[in-house]
Amino acid sequence: MGYKIAVVGATGNVGREMLNILAEREFPIEEIAAVASPASQGRQIDFGDSGKELKVRNIENFDFSDWDMALFAAGSGPTKIFAPKAAAAGCTVIDNSSLYRMDPDVPLIVPEVNPEAIDGYKAKNIIANPNCSTAQMMVALKPLHDAATIKRVVVSTYQSVSGAGKGGMDELFEQSRAIFVGDPKDNEVFTKQIAFNVIPHIDVFLDDGSTKEEWKMVVETKKILDPKIKVTATCVRVPVFVGHSESINIEFEREISAKKAQAILREAPGIMLVDKREDAGYTTPVECVGDSATYISRVREDPTVENGLNIWCVSDNLRKGAALNAVQIAELLGRKHLKKG
């Protein structure tokens, strides 16, 4: 027996990827619904490569009461309105927005890292999916933290434009084309030109000079992994369509060699270690697109601090950073709490 699953925001980048991954992983489904705004009602969208097409339903009159789980990829605005309604109707919400991540009554889950936290979902019948840049870093840090206890993390991100949605991807494409043919290039999604450029600014600025994206990485790491870990982040948008990269400097309480770290990461769930000290012996964003793994390369010791390591971390942000993690949460919820059959 399968589950009745609604994907909310099904016409967006992440919503479409959720449908793809549900089909790809053969999630046990009795019925699947694609739900979106009234503007998308009636559109036909593919359910992955299953050959099945779904007619998009209008979220404003969708009845959640007969559904087991709703995977929300609709942004904070619609989520604020409809997620509590779905949860109150008995449909467990797995939310990809930032709205509930720091709510103490809502578990913030990366299944490879803190699966036990899902037990608290009943307080609001909502489970939060972490920020895309946080999710892949948590997969990388968890096994190392278990081995040597992390004290401090310094992370610089290289985040693709797909993190800003379809509009961000379109802007990179249109600006690149305009530069080649000599047409005017406009900024609408990003604050500065993104084509052939990098922008050290994601989300709004806070009073301390950090951006909200950087703040998310700090507070979400503490909630998911360990509140004692100190984190400082610099988040940068780069002209890459899909795939976030991170340069992570880690300081540990106990000694851990690069060789030991490589051995640990090689066996860790969700990680693919590609670390040859030679030309092309590492992973770049282009190579991770469409893959579910978090790739780790360039593992090396940092001699400037006691018990320090540097690693390079790459992942498809639309998958592990969003859609895949949500589906993995749904699988975990099914195994632990909503068993059927």
Image: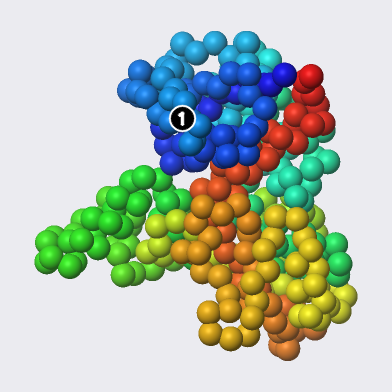
Can residue 78 be seen at all in this image of the molecule? no
66 left or right, relative to 163: right
The N terminus lies in which quarter of the figure?
top right
Q: Is residue 175 above or below residue 47?
A: below
The structure's colour scheme is rainbow
236 left or right, relative to 295: left
Q: Position of residue 193 (x, y in %)?
A: 29, 63
Q: Nearer the viewer, residue 80 or 3?
A: 3
Residue 166 found in image quarter: top left
* Residue occupying image coordinates x 34% and y 55%: 190
Residue topped by disc 1: 51
Q: Is residue 229 above or below residue 23?
A: below
* Residue occupying image coordinates x 20% and y 61%: 177
Q: Position of residue 287 (x, y in %)?
A: 50, 64
Mark 1: which amino acid?
Gly
Name, please, the residue furthest toward the bottom: 303
Residue 227 found in image quarter: bottom right
Q: Nearer the viewer, residue 238 or 200?
A: 238
Can residue 269 be seen at all in this image of the molecule? yes
Give the structural element (helix, strand or loop) at label 1.
loop
213 left or right, relative to 192: right
* Residue occupying image coordinates x 37% and y 24%: 44
Q: Is residue 10 above or below residue 150?
A: above
Q: Position of residue 95 (x, y in %)?
A: 60, 34
Q: Position of residue 215 (x, y in %)?
A: 59, 55
